[in-house]
Image: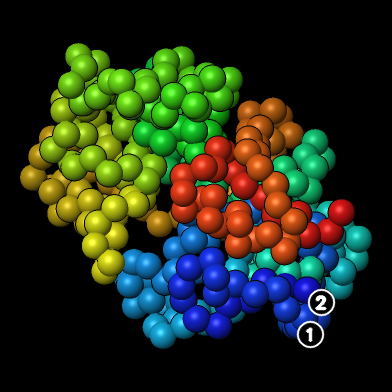
Amino acid sequence: MKAIVQDVYGSKDVLQLRELDKPIAGEGEVLVRVHAAGLDRGVWHMMTGLPYLIRILGFGFRGPKIPVPGMDVSGEVESVGSGVTRFKVGDEVFGTCEGSFAEFVCTKEEKLALKPESSSFEEAAALPVSALTALHGLRDCAQLEAGQKILIIGAGGGVGTYAVELAKHYGAIVTGVCGPSKQELVRSVGADHVIDYTKDDFTELDERYDQIFDIAGNRPLSKLRRALAPRGTLVIVGGEEGDRWLGGTHRQIGALLLSPFVKHNLRSFISEENQADLQVVKELAEAGALKPVIGKTYPLEQAAVALEDIEAGHATGKSVILVAQ
């Protein structure tokens, strides 16, 4: 089978298109013929091995433990291993795996769900990691309630567009922060208000928010807290600045250390994929509450180009690798 492979950490130049043996489903595993694979900034971090914290956390110190990139997947069940009861050959599925930039991939049964009937394979591949991150951040970490005012920083990205849609689904009043090229997109997915960060600094405006959902931002905690209501909640999802050791995670660490000593709730979380919440995402997609925004698609052999575009900040919504047509 064809697959994108990397032997070492580095830039897009470490990625190679190779022929690999087709995997075999083991106990509790499902072999999926991959139709499409989603990608986001997390895939770039795994490719580069930066920040170094991800190596320390077990993804491979000198080189990647998993040589094939990609986590988001959609496709058809090719075969099932012993003990698998939820899926059969031919089922259309979506979910997460290790190494979706390939024609076939094995993953645990509990990492998959039946594909939303209303979604194409391309759209389904754009859902799992980013939609689950938005769901876990808003529903579980922020505990967002109807009528609350929420500010979503990075509203035009993969997680951000889902966060806007989910926040509106939960009945919140949504303000999205993005660049000028993404304003119409953010409005189209449901934002009540949009702030162009190149023109206005929301931390200097008079508006105060019950919730701030900061996706891959770079503003210091002191500035973010200025925009919070007196007992508001800040949830930091990621960050793209900082040193090579911690990257943007220094803000998350700082928030967790500071929170017990201030009136604001300063939080962060790690999103873990599971079948129950994949089912929630499926149902929300079928109900029209979650509509994937796909900025650009790429054939498998152009995976390096896709990751270069993400690094350059050119991606809008989710990017998707098309594997099987």
State how the image is colored: rainbow
Task: Name the residue rendered at 66%, 32% in the picture.
Answer: 291
Instruction: Name the quarter where the N terminus is drawn.
Output: bottom right
Which residue position holds label 1? Answer: 21
Left or right: where 204 falls relative to 292: left
Instruction: Name the quarter where the C terminus is drawn.
Output: bottom right
Q: Are marks 1 and 2 in contact (CB under 8 Å)?
A: yes
Location of residue 72 in the rendering, given as x and y in whole percent from the top left corner: 64, 57
Location of residue 182 in the rendering, given as x and y in whole percent from the top left corner: 50, 27
Q: Report the disc number at residue 257.
A: none
Q: Amino acid at mark 1?
A: Asp
Task: Name the residue rendered at 46%, 73% in the picture.
Answer: 10
Closer to the camera in the image, 162 or 49? 49
* Image quadrant where residue 262 sits: top left
Task: Name the residue rendered at 55%, 74% in the picture.
Answer: 14
Residue 320 versus residue 103 in the image, above or below: above
